[in-house]
Image (cartoon, rainbow, N blue to C red):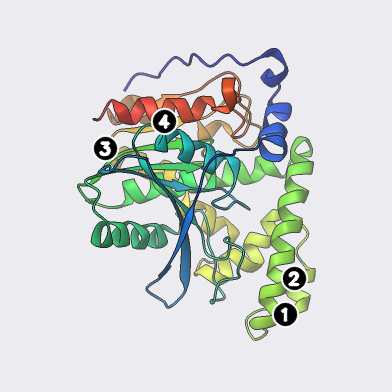
Amino acid sequence: MPIIESKYNPAFFFKNGFVSTVYSGLVRRVKDIKQKRERITLFDGDFIDLDWSFSEEQTNKLIVLLHGLEGNGQRPYMTGASRLFNNNNVDAVCVNFRGCSGEDNLKFRSYHSGATEDLEAVIKHIILEKEYSEIYLKGISLGANMILKYLGERESIPSQIKAAIAVSVPCYLGGSAKALHTFKNKLYHDRFLKYLVNRLKIKQQQFKESMSIEDIASIKTLYDFDNVYTAKAHGFKDALDYYETCSSLQFLSNIKIPALIINALNDSFLSPECYPVKEAKENPNIYLEMPKYGGHVGFVDKKNIYYNEKRALEFVKNTW
């Protein structure tokens, strides 16, 4: 599919990638949305919490929203999309990954960029327990990579899934990891690392046989975190094996439903490989939009409705 020419042109102040990223993560607020929580039990006895919001009218359409690293179902990029879709007669469910809903999960493992078995469990639950004939998927950053991997690594997916949107997606995890370790991203890197290590310290108290205090003390970078915890807890050899195995880039050629990728060219989290031009040109189901601006999940637009949210709605409406 030819590359999509983006029409995103924010106000001058938000053309700066750092400003748009920080504003969207720390300043933006979304009100006027009510969520109802549902807890589901996973195949290994752990749990995931789902935050539902609904259209005023009964509908057969649902959008499933996946957050990014350090995220949850109440982040503005989740509730903003939920509100917009609810106002357009589409129910929404925000998936909180393991341990991200305000309560630590039960297992030593948690979540990661390639944990598509958990997404599959959520989708199976929705199909078995709910009555939606049209399901759309939208992921942000880590959640976006998970969605693309889910769609491409399987020979078939449920027929109810009609389209997907992946925003600010690090589809080549190794390259994105290197980008996050550069000086320009030090503030982001340190913020993520502090949050993840603090959570790991709590988990270590419950699983002392799986991880020592010394192990945690050795974590100085995000790469260390993935090497010491992510890889060990989820069955990978090391961080590099995790990045290689879970990068969605290798699965894009096998995606069989319409999938829109929106990656800003000034996203400092993404490496050159995270702009899959070749893959988009070779697979008619991949739509690649590369706005000049937007930073990382920072597509600020008018009336507190973000550009990526508007594009997601436009994209799924084309399948109706």
In this view, the mark in front (1 or 4):
4
Q: CA distance from mark 1 to mark 3?
A: 44 Å
The residue that disc 4 covers is: 312
Q: Which mark is residue 257?
A: 3
Is label 3 in a helix, a strand or a loop? loop
What's the distance in space between the residues labelled 1 and 4, CA to CA?
Answer: 44 Å
Tag 1's secondary structure? loop
Per the image, the residue denoted by label 2 is 216
Upstream in sequence: badge 4 or badge 3? 3
Single out the mark in the foreground, 1 or 3.
3
Disc 1 target residue: 212
Amino acid type, label 2: Ile
Q: Residue at x 23, y 53 (%)?
A: 131
Whether label 3 touches label 2, CB < 8 Å: no
Q: Earlier in the sequence, mark 4 or mark 2?
A: 2
Q: Earlier in the sequence, mark 3 or mark 2?
A: 2
Mark with earlier residue (1, 4): 1
- Which residue occupies 29% across, 60% down? 124
